[in-house]
Image (tube, rainbow, N blue to C red):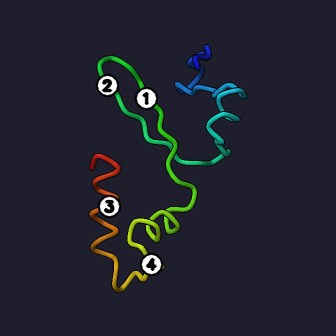
Amino acid sequence: MSELAVVGKRYSIVVPKSVRKKMNLKEGQRVMLKVEEGRLLIEPLPTDPYGVLERVIGEPYDEAKDEEKAEKWVKKHTDR
């Protein structure tokens, strides 16, 4: 799927409605921007990071117990 968009003031880009619907994007949702081989990739980040951590860890997230695992996962999945 490809759609045309324009870089506007302050370098903003409006995501076309067809793309927003297909990707289930929500206003205010965080995205990861990556540059690969001269292309700009926009990857939506989870809207419920604790739910993702629960699935990764395999049980409900407990900050005191799981902080180290969570930090490793976040670093791995955010290229930081």
Residues at discs 2 and 1 in contact (Cβ within 8 Å) = yes
Sequence-wise, which precedes: disc 1 or disc 4?
Answer: 1
Residue with the mark numbered 1: 41
The amino acid type, in three-letter code, at marker 3 is: Trp
The amino acid type, in three-letter code, at marker 2 is: Glu
Circle 1: element type = strand
Give the camera-side residue of 41 and 54: 54
Say which quarter of the image contains residue 58.
bottom left
- Residue 3 place in picture, x, y as percent: 62, 16
Query: Which residue: 50% across, 68% down?
Result: 50
Q: Is residue 6 above or below residue 30?
A: above
Q: Residue furthest front?
A: 58
Which of label 1 and label 4 is nearer to you? Answer: 4
Rounded to the nearest angstrom, the CA distance separating label 2 from label 3 is: 22 Å
Residue with the mark numbered 2: 36
Horizontal side, residue 55 vs residue 22: left or right: left
- Residue 61 place in picture, x, y as percent: 45, 78
Query: Which residue: 29% across, 46% down?
Result: 79
Circle 2: element type = strand
Which of label 2 and label 4 is nearer to you? Answer: 4
Query: Which residue: 29% across, 71% down?
Result: 69
Residue with the mark numbered 4: 59
Q: Is residue 23 above or below residue 76?
A: above
Sequence-wise, which precedes: disc 2 or disc 4?
Answer: 2
Sequence-wise, which precedes: disc 4 or disc 3?
Answer: 4
Residues at discs 1 and 4 in contact (Cβ within 8 Å) = no
Question: For the residue carrying disc 3, how many other residues have a C-alpha within 10 Å: few (<14), some (14-19), or many (20+)?
Answer: some
Residues at discs 2 and 4 in contact (Cβ within 8 Å) = no
Sequence-wise, which precedes: disc 1 or disc 3?
Answer: 1
Residue with the mark numbered 3: 73
Q: Is residue 4 above or below residue 68?
A: above
Circle 4: element type = loop
